[in-house]
Amino acid sequence: MAQAKTIQPRSIQVKCPSCSHPGSVEVWPIITSTTDERAMELVLNGRLFEHVCPACGKKVAVAYDCLLHDVEHRAFLLYTTKENPEVTGPHRLMDARDALRAKSQNVDNYQLRLALTTFEFCEKVRIWHDGYDDRAIELMKVAIKRGMLKEGIIGARDVLIYERTIEENGGVSFVVVGEIPGDVVGVPQGYDYCKRIIDEADKGFDLVGEYRFGAAWANAYLP
Ligand SMILES: [Zn+2]
């Protein structure tokens, strides 16, 4: 079978905004999870779109279009800096899936995802990597946040970010980002319930044609 053409990362030059020291950063326009190990490591560490100045250590955000093919989890994920990503993004994702289909690959149940921030991009990949359905995790976040809001222990604009599996009880932990950043919420249960909601919806094809599974979607979806 013909191998997909490998696109090596490009190097671009950046100047530190703090000390003006020049540096170079690797840019990956396309990442394939099974072959681009170095890029996957950067994604999983949340450092793909980040440059650290070699002179002063300042972190500089470097945003660019990136299409990730998660082969194991049958998904394409796109982050794009173009205007109106919600219009152009789905086309790029469908083209990527069609290209696979053209190579006689089975694309049934392939998930297409659009990330609107580089942060969300890396978070989605970590969620899949840890074996979760990102849609169920988003539902979980909404349920947890609603509970915390009711108790007055979180602000309306605070955001929960997936952290990891809690090994002792198989639960999931989230980092609270907002007014008091750095708090971690551990939730022993709830994932299986949210996953069932998603599986039922999938059977009814409720979710076909959705590319954005974030807080806004989850808020509208969860009764
Ligand atoms: Zn610097």
Image (cartoon, rainbow, N blue to C red):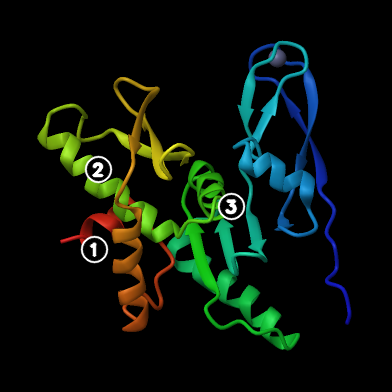
Label 1 vs 3, first from the N-terminus: 3
Helix, strand or loop under label 3: helix
The quarter holding residue 175 reads top left
In the rendered image, which residue does mark 1 sit on? Answer: 221
Determine which of the numbered discs, if any, sits on residue 108 in the image.
none
Instruction: Single out the residue that lies furthest toward the right.
Output: 2
Q: Nearer the viewer, residue 167 or 161?
A: 167
Q: Is residue 69 above or below residue 8?
A: below
Amino acid on which disc 3 is placed? His
User: As drawn, is 66 to the left or to the right of 199?
Assistant: right
| Image coords of residue 222 (percent x, y) | 21, 60
Q: Is residue 14 above or below residue 12?
A: above
Instruction: Single out the residue that lies furthest toward the left.
Output: 150
User: As drawn, is 51 to the left or to the right of 46?
Assistant: right
User: 10 Å neighbourhood of mark 3: few (<14), some, or many (≥20)?
Assistant: some
Real-space Cα separation, disc 2 to disc 1, in angstroms: 15 Å
Amino acid on which disc 2 is placed? Ile
Q: Which quadrant holds the C terminus?
A: bottom left
The quarter holding residue 47 reads top right
Residue at image point 31% right, 59% down: 194
Determine which of the numbered discs, if any, sits on residue 129 in the image.
3
Q: Quadrant of ligand 1?
A: top right
| Image coords of residue 22 (percent x, y) | 79, 22
Amino acid on which disc 1 is placed? Tyr
Q: Nearer the viewer, residue 131 or 154?
A: 131
Helix, strand or loop under label 2: helix
Determine which of the numbered discs, if any, sits on residue 144 in the image.
2
Q: Is residue 81 above or below residue 75?
A: above
Q: Mark 3 touching mark 2, by CB under 8 A? A: no
Residue at image point 77% right, 17% down: 54
Residue at image point 71% right, 42% down: 41
Helix, strand or loop under label 1: helix
